[in-house]
């Protein structure tokens, strides 16, 4: 298969939907010599902040001279974004080679009576095979959905990270914080140190119990690691971090918002855990890794005239964080939102967080079969904002937001990552 054929083959696997359990991927990995067992893994789960935290961990390890793989999902523009080594994406040719190798294994599984692996299970198996063949020193592995029975949870990591726990994917993970935290804490393994920045008391209780049951040392960000922000602007942040190993003065990250400082402290906790395990990482390398880390479509400035930021606040927790950052960090005369969310999200609650900040809102349709009755969001927005526009085409919606804004205003394109990614393509092509 060439790259286009390989991606078409992968997309066809989405017909298997979300089919949880580890049996299929374990069988598939066994057929390719279990590459996941030969990798040193930092496993990163949680509701929000997984990608940013994973990127900062990977950046610090790279600065320390290690060869570092990182597997994240979903991608914004190209499937190859999911697989990176020291910041460089996998080639399209290599993806095609790996999927061509994997395809007969899938066919053999079905012929032998096994269930067909899902698209994400195949993607995860490709990741393990790729990073093993490339002999990375570490793999920073982001959980896909949940934790306990997510296909990434076949690994025995060096460190398990749970960034935070909030309401998300209730159809799959549960209807309470306790239920969701129980699923997410499934990545905590016996004797493996665990890190969390969860601040919900119910979630913390579950995570603490899981760590105790597994004999895992638990580091809690906010208790065992604290921080003090000295400067927070739309260009980045300076902060001090206080850990059991010492004080890190004047750390700098380019990522915006207090939540990113918390993510940075979570990454720092994981790095210190690796240091305690005998891996060499010094303070200079930590500083360098933080300063170089970036994560697209998270409060990303893509235009200065007018100012436009993109943020994939695709759930309520993300919207609450975005609202706080818009109020605390950014200065503007008027805010204009370009907004589109999937039908299975808590859209009404998200609208209630963000719409009251805006002078006008442009509602658009995410490029996804799960967009649902996207037009009805306009009715919800209308409860808070008089000026509401309904524009299906994402590029046209983004342009409308820019047309409305003056030189002292701010445009925020937010909601579904599918929608934000398409808007990002428009700005990057300008």
Image (tube, rainbow, N blue to C red):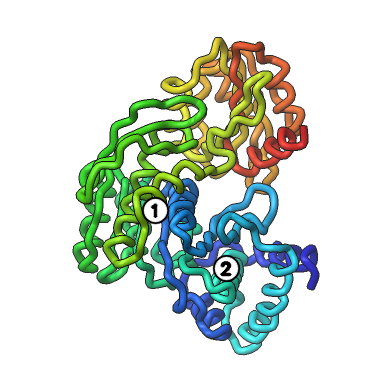
Horizontal side, residue 61 vs residue 338: left or right: left
Q: Residue at x 45, y 38 (%)?
A: 253
Q: Is residue 147 above or below residue 356?
A: below
Between circles 1 and 2, the one closer to the viewer is 2
CA distance for labels 1 and 2? 28 Å
Q: Quadrant of residue 343?
A: top right
Horizontal side, residue 179 vs residue 354: left or right: left
Image mark for residue 127? 2
Is residue 57 in view?
yes
Horizontal side, residue 112 vs residue 200: left or right: right
Which of the image's four quarters has the C terminus? top right
Is residue 201 in view?
no
SS type, badge 1 = loop
Q: Is residue 195 above or below residue 31?
A: above
Q: Residue at x 58, y 78 (%)?
A: 115
| Disc 1 crowd, CA 10 A, few/some/many (<14, 14-19, 20+) | some
Image mark for residue 174? 1
Q: Residue at x 77, y 36 (%)?
A: 429
SS type, badge 2 = helix
| Disc 2 crowd, CA 10 A, few/some/many (<14, 14-19, 20+) | many
The residue closer to the viewer here, 337 or 129, is 129
- Which percent across, then down, holds residue 373? 64, 37
- Which percent across, then down, holds residue 391? 73, 27
Question: Looking at the image, which residue sits at the far front?
Answer: 284
Q: Earlier in the sequence, mark 1 or mark 2?
A: 2
- Which percent across, then down, holds residue 370? 63, 47
- Which percent across, then down, holds residue 368? 67, 46
Image mark for residue 100? none
């Amino acid at each position: 298969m060439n790259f286009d054929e390989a991606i078409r083959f992968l997309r066809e696997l989405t017909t298997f939907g979300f089919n949880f359990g580890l049996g299929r991927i374990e069988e598939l990995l066994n057929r390719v010599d279990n590459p996941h067992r030969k990798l040193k893994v930092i496993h990163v789960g949680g509701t929000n902040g997984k990608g940013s935290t994973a990127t900062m961990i990977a950046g610090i390890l790279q600065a320390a001279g290690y060869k570092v793989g990182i597997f994240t999902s979903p991608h914004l523009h190209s499937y190859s974004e999911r697989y990176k080594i020291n910041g460089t994406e996998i080639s399209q040719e290599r993806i095609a080679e790996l999927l061509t190798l994997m395809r007969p294994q899938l066919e053999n599984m079905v012929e032998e009576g096994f269930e067909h692996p899902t698209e994400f299970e195949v993607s995860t198996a490709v990741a393990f095979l790729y990073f093993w063949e490339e002999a990375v020193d570490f793999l920073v592995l982001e959980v896909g959905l949940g934790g306990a029975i997510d296909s990434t949870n076949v690994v025995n990591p060096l460190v398990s990270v749970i960034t935070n726990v909030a309401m998300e994917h209730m159809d799959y993970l549960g209807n309470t914080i306790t239920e969701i935290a129980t699923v997410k804490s499934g990545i905590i393994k016996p004797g493996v140190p665990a890190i969390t920045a969860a601040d919900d008391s119910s979630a913390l209780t579950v995570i603490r119990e899981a760590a105790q049951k597994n004999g895992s040392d638990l580091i809690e960000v906010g208790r065992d690691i604290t921080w003090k922000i000295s400067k927070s602007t739309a260009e980045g942040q300076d902060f001090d971090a206080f850990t059991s190993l010492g004080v890190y003065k004047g750390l700098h990250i380019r990522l915006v918002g207090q939540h990113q400082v918390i993510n940075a402290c979570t990454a720092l906790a994981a790095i210190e855990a690796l240091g305690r395990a005998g891996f060499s990482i010094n303070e200079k390398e930590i500083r360098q890794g933080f300063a170089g880390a970036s994560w697209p479509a998270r409060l990303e400035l893509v235009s200065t005239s007018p100012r436009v930021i993109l943020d994939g606040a695709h759930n309520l927790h993300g919207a609450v964080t975005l609202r706080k950052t818009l109020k605390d960090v950014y200065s503007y005369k008027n805010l204009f939102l370009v907004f589109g969310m999937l039908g299975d999200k808590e859209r009404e609650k998200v609208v209630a967080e963000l719409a009251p900040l805006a002078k006008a809102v442009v509602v658009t349709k995410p490029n996804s079969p799960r967009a649902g009755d996207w037009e009805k969001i306009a009715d919800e927005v209308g409860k808070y904002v008089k000026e509401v526009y309904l524009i299906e085409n994402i590029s046209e919606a983004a342009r409308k937001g820019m047309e409305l804004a003056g030189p002292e205003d701010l445009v925020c394109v937010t909601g579904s990552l599918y929608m934000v990614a398409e808007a990002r393509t428009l700005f990057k092509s300008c």
